[in-house]
Amino acid sequence: MATMTAAPLSPKSEVFESQRGTLFGIAYRMLGSAAEAEDAVQDTWLRFHGSTDIESPRAYLTTIVSRICIDRLRSARARREVYPGTWLPEPLVEPIDAEPGPEQVAGGQELISYASMVLLETLAPAERAVFVLSEAMGFSHREIAEKLGITEAASRQTLHRARRHLADREQRYTATAEDRRRLTEAFLRASGSGDIASLTDLFAEDIVVTSDGGGKRVAALNPIHGRDRVLRFLVGTMEKEPADEVRLVRVNGDPGLVTWRRGKVQLVASFDWDEMGKLRTLHMMRNPDKYTHVRVEAAD
């Protein structure tokens, strides 16, 4: 039997595919949604495919995806203002020992962590674009100015505002990578066994829980603050909707949890641990529309 071979890519397709990870990395960091990022990358391909006389394809592609994302982000912010409850970024979920994906390699892990993605949501569209292009992708102010159609001075000023804005909200001290996995495993054991004392001991006094149900799943409309209130919320949630399976995974590169109920993803949890080994922030994604990049299947 003859062996089928894939048709060779056109030169334009080869260039685009070589930049796909970078383009997705830019789009995801700017939009906070993997599904919308993929749409932005596809729109970028369509414009690139129909273009001619391009001197620098890489510069052209990153310019196009940046401008598409700014337009999308402006309209998205309006939609998020009427979103039911807290809007959280769409998580990227992989097996716990998976190698970093191309979107993480392109731009680095730090600015694609879930905590960073939540912080980026507080920036205005222009600030977010400049910050991502500068801090994550390493573009100069001259390059950013060309991509966004602004002056170099405006790029510098916008980056300064973005950094100052984020610095006011950023958690200064965090646990090491090894401790983050150990602590997340401890949370999994304590919650799975119903060990309330051990679970409570993991919480910081000022712990905050945010949950995103999108109006489709039960979730707290506002963040929950404080150890006692968080404990009651978590215990009540686990009793009301017990999971059939819970697994340690990577959420945006860091240890997190996925739960399944009746064969479907029920929850994606992301953890922010401080340097004392205490859980400061727990983000709970419950909106099923935001599970498009859960790359882990439930057990048969």
Image: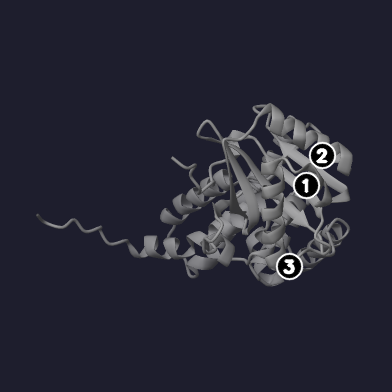
Q: In which quarter of the image is the N terminus?
A: bottom left
Residue, disc 3: 176
| Mark found first going from the N terminus, 2 or 1 | 1
Residue at 82% across, 64% down: 275
Residue at position x 61%, y 52% from top?
28
Name which of mark 1 and mark 3 comes first in the sequence. 3
For the question of whether residue 122 can be seen, the reply is: no
Query: CA gap, disc 2 to disc 3?
Result: 25 Å
Nearest to the eye among marks 2 and 1: give it: 1
Amino acid at circle 3: Thr
Q: In this view, does 254 lie above or below 218?
A: below
Q: Is residue 232 left or right of residue 9?
A: right
User: What amino acid type is highlighted by mark number 2?
Assistant: Leu
Label ID, residue 231: 2
Residue at mark 1 to residue at mark 3: CA–CA distance: 20 Å
CA–CA distance in space, label 2 to label 1 = 8 Å
Residue 198 visible to the viewer = yes
Colour setting: one colour
Q: Quadrant of the C terminus?
A: top left
Q: Is residue 155 above or below residue 118?
A: below
Check disc 1 and report the residue beneath it.
199
Q: Position of residue 34 (x, y in %)?
A: 57, 47
CA neighbours of label 1 inside 10 A, class few (<14), some (14 to 19), many (20+): some
Few, some or many residues within 10 Å of mark 3 (<14, 14–19, 20+): few
The residue lying at 73 percent from left, 67 percent from top is: 176
Give the mark toward the camera: 2 or 3.
2
